[in-house]
Image (spheres, rainbow, N blue to C red):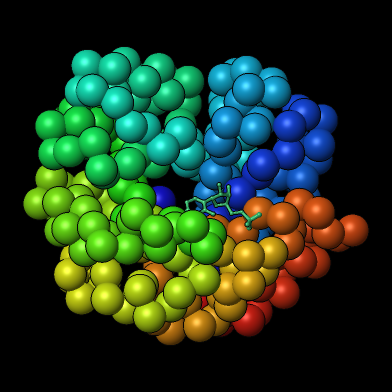
């Protein structure tokens, strides 16, 4: 994904009309649109192709299965027009390798979750976050997902993965994280959902975050 605004929209609305309206309004401010289960379960995987006409789509399916199932999921998602997929890493290196292999075949990107941004994200993830980050680097993933709610953890993870991998970081706004703080800590992009799509003016909200980051 090309870095212009350092902002990824998390489009967790559940209906097509709202999704396309918001995506159109903010497309000039975002480098990518992240879609996940809420929108795809609401409207079907076909929504990916429609959104991909506005911005590259990251499919946030937090893939977490055996290698063969992961392969099938990645193939479906890339065939649907997604530019990237988010996978879990705790399922192990063989599962991640399977996703990276499909991504290479399709020339697409894979981001691996290292530690989640909500309070419960520290319960099980914290002790293994660094190991997962190292595995993502070793496996040739494009980047990792690290929490904007804990910029110090983004800094820790950046030390492990070096400068070759990207960090995309959710948790800004509704979950309490600051966009400027997490970019300063080493994230490449912030991922923002509710603070934009629940705003009366999604474009103004997105522009404000861009201005704050001065990316
Ligand atoms: O609405 P909000 O800005 O909190 O949305 C954050 C988005 O990032 C949601 O789509 C959520 O599922 C996702 N996410 C997250 N923490 C992670 C990975 C993904 O909040 N570790």
* Residue 15 placement, left or right of 64: right
Residue 67 percent coordinates (x, y): 20, 23
Quarter of the image for residue 203 reads bottom right
Residue name at image x 71 percent, y 44 percent: 23
Residue name at image x 27 percent, y 69 percent: 157
* Residue 80 placement, left or right of 105: right
* Residue 105 placement, left or right of 14: left
Residue 207 percent coordinates (x, y): 71, 69
Residue name at image x 89 percent, y 58 percent: 200
- Can residue 118 be spotted in the picture? yes
Quarter of the image for residue 95 reads top left
Residue lying at the far front in this picture: please name it.
123
- Can residue 3 be spotted in the picture? no
Residue name at image x 55 percent, y 44 percent: 34
Q: How many marks?
A: 0
Nearest the viewer among 178 and 203 is 178
Residue lying at the far right in this picture: please name it.
200
Nearest the viewer among 99 and 115 is 115
Is 136 placed above or below 184 here? above
Nearest the viewer among 82 and 170 is 170
Is 201 placed above or below 150 here? above
């Amino acid at each position: 994904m090309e870095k212009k605004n350092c902002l990824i929209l998390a489009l967790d609305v559940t209906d097509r009309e709202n999704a396309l309206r918001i995506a159109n309004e903010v497309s000039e401010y975002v480098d990518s649109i992240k879609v996940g289960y809420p929108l795809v379960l609401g409207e079907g995987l076909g929504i990916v192709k429609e959104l991909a006409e506005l911005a590259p789509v990251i499919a946030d399916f937090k893939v977490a299965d055996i290698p063969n199932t992961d392969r099938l999921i990645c193939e479906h998602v890339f065939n649907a027009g997604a530019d990237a997929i988010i996978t879990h890493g705790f399922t192990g290196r063989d599962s991640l390798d399977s996703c990276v292999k499909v991504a290479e075949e399709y020339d697409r990107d894979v981001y691996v979750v290292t530690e989640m941004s909500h309070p419960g994200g520290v319960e099980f993830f914290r002790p293994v976050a660094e190991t997962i980050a190292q595995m993502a680097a070793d496996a040739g993933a494009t980047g990792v997902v690290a929490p904007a709610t804990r910029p110090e953890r983004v800094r820790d993870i950046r030390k492990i993965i070096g400068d070759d991998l990207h960090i995309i970081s959710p948790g800004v706004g509704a979950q309490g994280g600051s966009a400027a703080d997490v970019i300063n800590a080493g994230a490449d992009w912030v991922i923002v959902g509710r603070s934009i799509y629940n705003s009366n003016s999604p474009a103004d909200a997105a522009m404000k975050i861009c201005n704050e980051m001065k990316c």
